[in-house]
Image: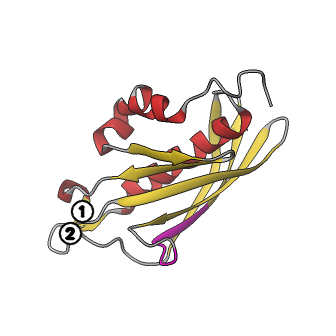
């Protein structure tokens, strides 16, 4: 772990830099983090529904949430922000998100090599034992 390990603050990162562009438009917020994980929240927004009649969120915002949560988990584990690119991020949907409920996304970095980080994660809308989706991916350091 680098000497900057205690200097990276995911909450500060999400509330400042993470509020620009796509993530800012979606309103993604920081919830908590652990030694190798980061948990974020995507507030419900009917404008993000894939079908306005049902109010069920489209898949894109959930993928974005999981990409951000897993990316930040890498920086939490390594203790610093490093430029990286998403090589592969697979999101398997288990059920639709409940209309009107925020989606919680937790990303975990479970291995870092010299050039690649390996992540996994889960999204739910209130009950981690009843997930919306599972994620698995790899990121390459630039």
Rendered position, 77 above or below 1: below
Q: Give the range drawn in magenta.
A: 129-135
Locate the N terminus and report the quarter of the image it occupies: top right
Dot 1 corresponds to which residue?
Answer: 49
Q: Distance between the residues labelled 1 and 2?
A: 5 Å
| Residue 59 relative to residue 34: left or right | left
Is residue 130 part of the magenta span, yes or no? yes
Dot 2 corresponds to which residue?
Answer: 55
Q: Tell me where residue 71 appears, x and y as whole percent.
A: 59, 42
Q: Tell me where residue 33 appears, x and y as whole percent.
A: 57, 46
Locate the C terminus and report the quarter of the image it occupies: top right
Disc 2 element: loop
Q: Tell me where residue 134 appears, x and y as whole percent.
A: 56, 67
Comparing 5 with 25, the one in front is 5
**Quarter of image, res 89:** bottom right
**Quarter of image, res 15:** top left
Q: Tell me where residue 128 appears, x and y as whole percent.
A: 50, 71
Q: Residues within 10 Å of mark 1 (few under 14, many from 20)?
A: many
Disc 1 element: strand
Query: For the image shown, how many numbered marks are present on the structure?
Result: 2
| Residue 52 relative to residue 72: left or right | left
Is residue 75 part of the magenta span, yes or no? no
């Amino acid at each position: 772990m680098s000497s900057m390990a205690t200097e990276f603050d995911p909450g500060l990162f999400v509330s400042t830099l993470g509020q620009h562009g796509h993530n800012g438009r979606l309103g993604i917020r920081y919830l908590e983090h652990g030694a190798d994980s980061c948990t974020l929240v995507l507030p419900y927004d009917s404008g993000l529904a894939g079908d306005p009649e049902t109010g069920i969120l489209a898949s894109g915002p959930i993928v974005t949430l999981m990409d951000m949560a897993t990316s930040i988990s890498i920086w939490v584990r390594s203790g610093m922000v490093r430029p990286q690119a998403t090589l592969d991020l697979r999101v398997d949907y288990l059920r639709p998100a409940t209309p009107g409920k925020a989606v919680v996304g937790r990303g975990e970095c479970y291995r870092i090599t010299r050039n690649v980080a390996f992540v996994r994660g889960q999204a739910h809308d209130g009950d981690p034992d009843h997930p919306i989706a599972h994620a698995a991916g790899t990121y390459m350091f630039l």
